[in-house]
Image (tube, helix red, strand yellow):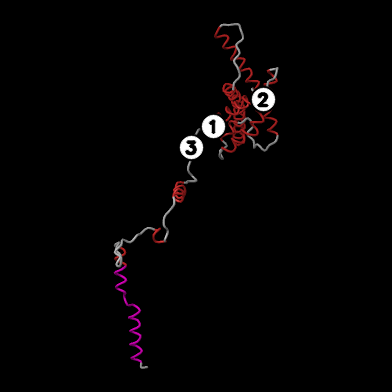
Amino acid sequence: MSKKKKEKSRETTIENYYDLKVDKVDELVAALKGEDVESQEPVSYKVEDCIGKEGVTEQELSEKKAAKEFDPYKVDKLSRVPTWLKALFVKFWFAGAVCYFIMFGIQFADALDTVIITGVVMGIVVDVLVNPIFRYMESDRKEYNAYMMFPFPFKKFWTFFTNIIYYVVVLISVYYCYEGLNLLIGLIKGTTNKIHVGVEPLLFGVFTTIADMAFIGIKDLIVYLVKRNKRKKEETENV
């Protein structure tokens, strides 16, 4: 084969290779305009039609919507409630529950025996339930330490016994709160007869929470004064 014939063949091949398919371009333009050259039907741009899927079920739509709305960093409504309000409510609720199940369920002839037994149960409930709930809700700031008499991890076994002793003292204080309330009502009414206000969960929960927070406030004040004096002593030594 001559050199001239080879060059001609090569040029023909290159021209064929780069030959523009005009009819295909027309079909593409018609498709983009929404026209079908053969059927004259509008071209669907839906993903379901392109992939051959008939439709999306209601469950799939709800799952997609839930996945879209889920935000792991979204602040829930409970976290917007002030810490002091949540702490006092938990204390009040568990105190009322102990009153309902223990004082109403167990009757002793001596009122002091009832107070002591209730204090023991209250200490167990606080150590096993209330303090772990506070630990679960708190952040790295340890904001619930101010609402616990012994703000230590609940795995410390000795807090079990100290909470029992402490809440026996708290319940004795609650007993005298009732006595003081009865005396105050008697003075207001101007009668010498002893007024007896019955024990019920709501008022009992209020008195227990007040007495508990009073003791915790005294403890927190003592800790604050000790830390302040220690800090002042260190500053004086450094000077």
Please state the horizontal and vertical placement of residue 216, each as a whole percent of the image: 61, 27
Indicate yes or no whether the magenta region holds residue 159: no
Where disc 2 sits, the SS reads: helix
Looking at marks 1 and 3 on the same chain, the residue that comes earlier in the sequence is marked by 3
Residue name at image x 35 percent, y 85 percent: 10
Residue under circle 3?
A: 77
Looking at marks 2 and 3 on the same chain, the residue that comes earlier in the sequence is marked by 3
Q: Main secondary structure of the magenta part?
A: helix
Nearest the eye: 21 or 151: 21
Magenta part of the protein: which range?
3-27
Residue name at image x 57 percent, y 23 percent: 202
The three-letter code of the residue at mark 2 reads Gly
| Image quarter (top left, top right, bottom left or bottom right) of the C terminus | top right
Binning the other alpha carbons within 10 Å of mark 1 as few (below 14), some (14 to 19) or many (20 upward) gives some
Residue name at image x 62 percent, y 20 percent: 174
- What's the CA distance linking mark 2 and mark 1? 22 Å
